[in-house]
Image (spheres, rainbow, N blue to C red):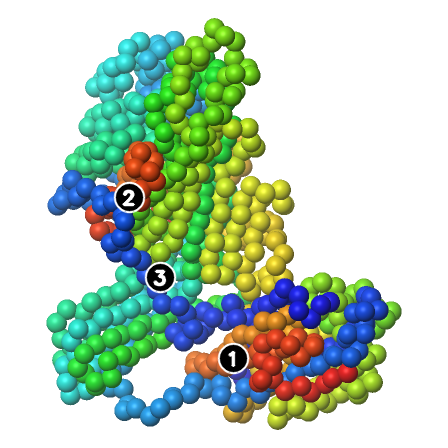
């Protein structure tokens, strides 16, 4: 053993382990953040001055949840069975612009022994007909992105709570308007961000909240998923709507997929807030290359010009001086990853690595002091979220994406039936989704740092529980 | 009885895995003793006694996975009103508290106090002994004129080890026959039992250093004879004004804090550092070598 090797066993005397005992003398001062950093493009003033907040406001309690579904394609068509399976929930209405999908979904629901829902479809406005005719407690929207805002707002105005697939809206003024509509209608609208219910993501947040990583300093998340075959499939995304977005915008379409779990771990809007964004985009080459190699000359995609970079990176700063990086990479050949990395003063986690059952690795002081990664399995077991210990088996048998879809559904139904505060509220949803249009705004300005909107209007520092919730029984 | 958390390691000799390493060890093996004679915080320069007292209520740590409250009380026993008072609260590292900073409007008149409530997320607590410190730093004008006062509360959870021996988790000493069992440094190396024996370091031997007498573990080679420091807590009988530890580093940065939790609820903390087996690294100027080969 070399006497001058890289320090191993550096925690011999437990500096990290004991620092918490001596925080007054040794702890760094509370993380400070710049208030008006130079070079930051200021945001417009919040348009909702003086309006009553829905922060911390519980759902109106319902014994039985009446659900309506808008959008029954690949996403919605795969979600109805989960909604129907949650105790206390029933699907009363289904809607799709293609009436045959509504009929097929109603058939499936009936075939599973549930009451047949009412069917709506055949026109772009069919969803409004459904909202006008059926009284619903929750509307779930899984349509192409460009419809989310209009349908979400309409569902709120119809008196329902709303779960919207990613994103809740595509433009900043629309996002603000959804916040305004929630506050006006006094019901909740939230992003159905299933990644927040991932086993590793939830455990990561709970490990962070327990202080195992020390004070958090940075995090990273992402959506790195080779979607090229699906984007060029003429049936998978109806009218290839998703590929079309790549011809019109250079932005992080799915920033929230990686941002949500990191924000939960960092208590964003619950003690900290995102203060800025700057984004960069690589060249847009992946889709054109794929088309060149795999698409026949008569494929409609040959009319496309792709403008969305293959790698869109967003960098955020927070009020407490933390940094967050998100990546979007759906047009390159690569294995799947949502990154999920969290670093604090006493250690870090990295997900999506081939270690252990969890597929994640951890290194923290003083538990480890030898510069050697450990798999995350033991920590995940120690900090497993109660949803996974209580409902995980059901989730894995009922739902897609390894059970995270069903957990989101189960928890949503439970929260409404018990009259709880939502795990994810409109403020979280707006914060995570604002990165979508703002990434494009930053890219258009050469990677400018933009001031980030505070959808809570100053109440971000109030500690609230969020997704790291207290265990509850389903009534 | 008091409780001590100390990430300590008792130095132990080793046989090494290669001739070169063995030669190094035989030539340079030390063990270090440290005298922690100032476990109580030093007051430093004399200053007038504080007449502003800051106290914190306990947090309900049993209510895991909930948000609890903590009350900070600022009491002005001086003859002058306090003004511009600001309270900054800090919880255990990584815990979220809200608000972190509170401005007290108006003044705190002499003989009165103010209280402010802070919310704290109580997370899932880890097994084993853990300590959680909450502190409130208060700055102000007026009052006793000192301008600042601090209140602290340390709470604990979990069980402590009955003795230091129960913390032993590492084979630090091996003879040539058992060298494979050793792993003092995390790389499979250990101190030479043969070399230590030559220096009179045998099971149960007394070793003098740092004003204390240490008893070498009454264990044979290739047994768990030392503890890798990572925040363990163990019961410690006795009384005195200092605490000495026999330790060795295996790196250049073996240092940290030792905290004693007294039966009356008080605590005191000292800081120690020890070089590695070559005498290089943290604590070169403060640790006393008691064994060398």
Is B125 on the left or on the right of A134, as rendered? right
Q: Is residue B36 visible?
A: yes
- The percent position of residue A205, horizontal first and vertical second, equals 44, 50
Q: Which residue is mark 3?
A: A31
Q: Quadrant of residue B234?
A: bottom right
Q: Which residue is mark 2?
A: A450
Q: Nearer the viewer, residue A71 or A245?
A: A245
The kind of secondary structure element at disc 2 is strand
The kind of secondary structure element at disc 1 is strand
**Parent chain of label 2:** A
In the image, what residue occupies the spot 74% across and 79% down? B29
Q: Are marks 2 and 3 in contact (CB under 8 Å)?
A: no
Q: Nearer the viewer, residue A34 or B16?
A: A34
**Parent chain of label 3:** A
The correct choice, above or below, for A153 with respect to B215 in the image is: above
Q: Nearer the viewer, residue B55 or A103?
A: B55
Q: CA distance from mark 2 to mark 1?
A: 45 Å
The correct choice, above or below, for B285 with respect to A325 in the image is: below
Q: Residue furthest front?
A: A446
Q: Which mark is residue B271?
A: 1
Q: CA distance from mark 2 to mark 3?
A: 21 Å
- The percent position of residue B91, horizontal first and vertical second, equals 37, 66
The kind of secondary structure element at disc 3 is loop
In the image, what residue occupies the spot 39% across and 74% down? A24
The correct choice, above or below, for B92 with respect to B45 in the image is: above
């Amino acid at each position: 053993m070399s006497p001058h090797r890289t320090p191993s066993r550096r925690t011999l005397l437990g500096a990290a382990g004991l620092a918490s005992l001596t925080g007054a003398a040794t702890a760094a001062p509370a993380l400070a953040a710049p208030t008006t950093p130079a070079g930051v493009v200021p945001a417009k003033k919040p348009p909702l001055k003086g309006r009553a907040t829905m922060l911390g406001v519980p759902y109106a309690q319902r014994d039985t949840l009446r659900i309506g579904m808008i959008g029954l394609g690949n996403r919605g068509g795969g979600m109805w069975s989960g909604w129907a399976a949650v105790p206390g929930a029933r699907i009363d209405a289904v809607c799709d612009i293609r009436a045959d999908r509504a009929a097929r979904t109603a058939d499936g629901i009936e075939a599973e022994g549930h009451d047949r829902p009412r069917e709506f479809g055949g026109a772009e406005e069919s969803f409004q007909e459904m909202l006008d005719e059926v009284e619903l407690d929750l509307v779930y929207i899984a349509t192409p992105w460009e419809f989310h805002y209009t349908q979400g707002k309409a569902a709120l105005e119809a008196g329902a709570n709303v779960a919207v697939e990613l994103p809740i809206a595509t433009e900043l003024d629309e996002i603000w308007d959804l916040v305004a509509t929630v506050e006006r209608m006094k019901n909740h609208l939230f992003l159905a961000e299933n990644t927040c219910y991932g086993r590793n993501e939830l455990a990561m947040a709970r490990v962070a909240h327990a202080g195992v990583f020390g004070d958090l300093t940075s995090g990273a998340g992402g959506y790195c998923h080779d979607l090229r075959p699906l984007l060029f499939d003429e049936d998978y995304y109806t009218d290839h709507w998703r590929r079309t977005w790549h011809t019109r915008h250079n932005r992080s379409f799915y920033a929230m997929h990686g941002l949500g779990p990191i924000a939960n771990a960092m208590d964003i809007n619950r003690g900290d807030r995102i203060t800025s964004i700057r984004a960069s985009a690589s060249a847009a080459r992946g889709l054109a290359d794929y088309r060149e190699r795999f698409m026949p000359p008569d494929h409609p995609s040959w009319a496309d010009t792709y403008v969305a970079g293959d790698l869109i990176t967003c960098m955020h700063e927070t009020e407490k001086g933390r940094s967050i990086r998100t990546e979007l990479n759906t047009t390159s050949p690569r294995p799947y990853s949502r990154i999920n990395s969290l670093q604090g003063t006493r250690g870090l986690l990295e997900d999506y690595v081939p270690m252990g059952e969890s597929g994640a690795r951890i290194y923290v002081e003083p538990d480890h002091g030898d510069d050697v990664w450990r798999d995350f399995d033991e920590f995940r077991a120690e900090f497993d979220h109660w949803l996974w210990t209580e409902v995980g088996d059901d989730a894995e048998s009922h739902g897609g994406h390894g059970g995270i879809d069903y957990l989101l559904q189960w928890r949503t139904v439970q929260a409404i039936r018990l009259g709880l505060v939502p795990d994810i509220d409109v403020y979280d949803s707006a914060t995570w989704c604002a990165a979508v249009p703002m990434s494009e705004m930053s890219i258009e300005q050469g990677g400018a740092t933009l001031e980030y909107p505070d959808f809570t209007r100053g109440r971000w520092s109030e500690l609230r529980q969020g997704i790291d919730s207290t265990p509850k029984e389903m009534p | 009885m008091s409780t001590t958390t100390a990430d300590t390691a008792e130095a132990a000799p080793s046989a090494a895995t290669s001739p070169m390493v063995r030669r190094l060890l035989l030539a340079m093996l030390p063990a270090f003793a440290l005298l922690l004679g100032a476990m109580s915080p030093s007051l430093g320069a004399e200053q007038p006694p504080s007449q502003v007292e800051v106290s914190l209520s306990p947090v309900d740590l049993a209510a895991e996975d909930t948000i609890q409250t903590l009350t900070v009380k600022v009491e002005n026993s001086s003859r002058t009103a306090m003004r511009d008072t600001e309270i900054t609260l800090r919880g255990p590292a990584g815990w979220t508290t809200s608000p972190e900073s509170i401005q007290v409007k108006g003044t705190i008149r002499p003989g009165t106090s103010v209280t402010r409530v802070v919310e704290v997320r109580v997370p899932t607590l880890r097994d084993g002994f853990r300590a959680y410190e909450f502190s409130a730093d208060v700055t102000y004008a007026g009052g006793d004129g000192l301008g600042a006062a601090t209140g602290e509360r340390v709470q604990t959870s979990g069980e402590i080890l009955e003795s230091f021996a129960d913390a032993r988790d590492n084979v630090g000493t091996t003879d040539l026959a058992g060298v494979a069992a050793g792993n003092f440094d995390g790389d499979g190396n250990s101190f030479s039992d043969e070399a230590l024996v030559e220096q009179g370091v045998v099971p149960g031997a007394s070793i003098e250093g740092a004003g204390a007498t240490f008893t070498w573990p009454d264990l044979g080679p290739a047994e768990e004879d030392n503890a890798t420091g990572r925040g363990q807590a163990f019961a410690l009988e006795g009384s005195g004004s200092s605490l000495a530890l026999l330790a060795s580093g295996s790196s250049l940065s073996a240092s940290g804090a030792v905290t004693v939790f007294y039966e009356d609820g008080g605590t005191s903390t000292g800081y120690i550092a020890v070089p590695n087996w070559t005498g290089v690294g943290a604590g070169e100027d403060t640790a006393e070598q008691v064994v060398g080969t």
